[in-house]
Each structure stands twice: as structure tokens, then as C-alpha cells.
Image (cartoon, helix red, strand yellow):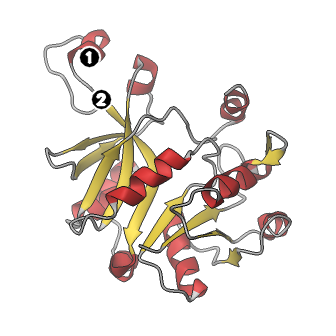
């Protein structure tokens, strides 16, 4: 398969504006993500998609692979789709790689690419086992449950599933829970269909775009990996990443 990774990169963030330009290991968060993706042998090409002149100018300092997109997009996925159509090259799989995940690894990227080898998979994403109560009950940590074939059933900010008649401090001892890793891979054959789907009620309720695809019955599968990375959503997250 030919694989393209696109990093949607907007400047304005409600909790941490300009975070992609913040420094981590002497490079910006965005450059860290770009270099991680570029070093993965399973990825053929990496692009940055942005609507910000500040991010454009910064990105051009380390790569020519930058695409300006509309400022009207409500999600990073929509920005990726516009950028993909502007690239004008044929790929089999598009990876939407979050620009604020500087701790991403080759293992994570390889895992989602391997998942996309299966014909049944239209959309792929990843999960990792939750190991602490803080993660389990943190509304900013999205949880996912899948069926016995690893097809996604539901994503939520709440802990899933709810364990009836068991006190919450015992939940992690009773069963395994999984957090969603915010990386997506799409067979390019389904991109046109995805781009025209309307928002759904579950998506609106949880503010999670992946629920739109689940509600529309798309074949979205989840691979499980060991990964202790996280997105940089706050200045505190950045300080935590610096200690990794």
C-alpha cells in the first residue's frame, strides 16, 4: 500500500493557542510530529495542512510539504481531506496524524498501517489499555469499546462500560478498559463518502467526530497497542512531555 500521512495544524486552540509552535527538545511540537512520521518506513509521504500563516511560515523552515487549506473546517479530518485532494497523487491509505502528538512512535504508525491491510477495514484507529483511575475517569481521555472482531462499537468521554453493582475504585481490577489514541487511517476509496456525511446526534452529544462514522455504519476497526504518549492540550501537558 502507498501511505500518505497528513498532519492537520491549526494555530488557534481554545485551551492552548499556538501550542504547535511551542518547543519540545529544541524543536517545535509540530516539527517533532513531522519528523517522527517522516522517519517511519511504512509512510511514503508526509504533509502538513494548515490555515495559519504563522504555521505555514514555520513549517516551511523544515519542509516544503505544506498545504494551505480553508479556515472553515470544523475538524482536522476535514482539513486532511481537502489537503489530500490538493496533493494530486495516488495513495491507498491516508493517515490523519494529530499535530499535537509529539510522542508518537514508529510502532504506533506501523500498527495502524498493518490494520489497514485488511479488506474489511475502511477506517482504522488505535487504543491502549488504561492503567490508572485518573485516566479512567478523566473526561478528556476518550474511551472506546469494540466487538469481538475489534470493530468499534462506541467512543465516550465517560468510562465504558459501566460496571453495575461494583464500586468505581474496583473497576480496573474487574476488567480492562481502553483509551482511544487519536490517530485515524482511511482507505482513500471512502474519503469522498466521509466528506459528505452530516453531523450526527451522538457526535454532537459527545463532541467526538468518530461517532459520525460509527453511526453511519462504516467499518471502523480498532487495533490495540502499548502507548503512553498523549496529546498536548495544555501548558501542563507540555511540561509533562518534556519529562518523558
Q: Nearer the viewer, residue 34 or 231?
A: 34
Q: Position of residue 29 (x, y in %)?
A: 73, 48
- Inspect this view and state whether residue 208 appears: no
**Secondary structure found at label 2:** loop
Q: Earlier in the sequence, mark 2 or mark 1?
A: 1
The N terminus, quarter of image: bottom left
Give the crowd class for mark 1: few <14, some 14-19, many >=20 residues within 10 Å: some
Q: Position of residue 30 (x, y in %)?
A: 71, 54
In the picture, the disc for residue 187 is none
Q: Is residue 223 above or below residue 134?
A: below
Quarter of the image for residue 176 reads: top left
How far apart are the two marked residues, 2 and 1, measured between alpha carbons? 9 Å
Does 211 sit left or right of 58 as displayed? left
Query: Which residue appears at 25% of the width and 47% of the height?
Result: 154
> Residue 191 falls in which quadrant of the image?
bottom left
Q: Which mark is residue 177?
A: 2
> Do the residues bearing badges 2 and 1 touch, measured as CB atoms within 8 Å?
yes
What is the quadrant of the C terminus in the image? Answer: top right
Q: Residues within 10 Å of mark 2 (few under 14, many from 20)?
A: many
Instruction: Decide if residue 111 is in sight here.
Output: yes
Tag on residue 171? 1
**Could you tell whether 23 is left or right of 243 in the image?**
right
User: What percent of the width, then of the height, locates residue 100?
Assistant: 63, 49
Q: Position of residue 162 (x, y in %)?
A: 21, 27
Identify the secondary structure beneath mark 1. helix
Amino acid at each position: 500500500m502507498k501511505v500518505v500521512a497528513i498532519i492537520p495544524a491549526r494555530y488557534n486552540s481554545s485551551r492552548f493557542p499556538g501550542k504547535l509552535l511551542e518547543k519540545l527538545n529544541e524543536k517545535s511540537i509540530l516539527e517533532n510530529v513531522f519528523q517522527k512520521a517522516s522517519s517511519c518506513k511504512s509512510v511514503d509521504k508526509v504533509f502538513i495542512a494548515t490555515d495559519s500563516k504563522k504555521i505555514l511560515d514555520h513549517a516551511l523552515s523544515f519542509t516544503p510539504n505544506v498545504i494551505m487549506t480553508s479556515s472553515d473546517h470544523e475538524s482536522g479530518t476535514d482539513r486532511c481531506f481537502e489537503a489530500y485532494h490538493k496533493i494530486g497523487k495516488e495513495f491507498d491509505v491516508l493517515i490523519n496524524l494529530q499535530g499535537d502528538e509529539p510522542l508518537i512512535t514508529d510502532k504506533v504508525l506501523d500498527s495502524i498501517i498493518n490494520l489497514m491491510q485488511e479488506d474489511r477495514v475502511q477506517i482504522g484507529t488505535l487504543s491502549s489499555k488504561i492503567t490508572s483511575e485518573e485516566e479512567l475517569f478523566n473526561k478528556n481521555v476518550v474511551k472506546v469499546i469494540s466487538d469481538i472482531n475489534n470493530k468499534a462499537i462506541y467512543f465516550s468521554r465517560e468510562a465504558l462500560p459501566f460496571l453495575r453493582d461494583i464500586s468505581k475504585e474496583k473497576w480496573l481490577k474487574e476488567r480492562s478498559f481502553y483509551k482511544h489514541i487519536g490517530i485515524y487511517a482511511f482507505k482513500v476509496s471512502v474519503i469522498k463518502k466521509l466528506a459528505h456525511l452530516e453531523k450526527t446526534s451522538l457526535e454532537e452529544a459527545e463532541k467526538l467526530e468518530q461517532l459520525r462514522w460509527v453511526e453511519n455504519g462504516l467499518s471502523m476497526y480498532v487495533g490495540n497497542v502499548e502507548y503512553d504518549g498523549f496529546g498536548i492540550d495544555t501548558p501542563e501537558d507540555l511540561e509533562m512531555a518534556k519529562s518523558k
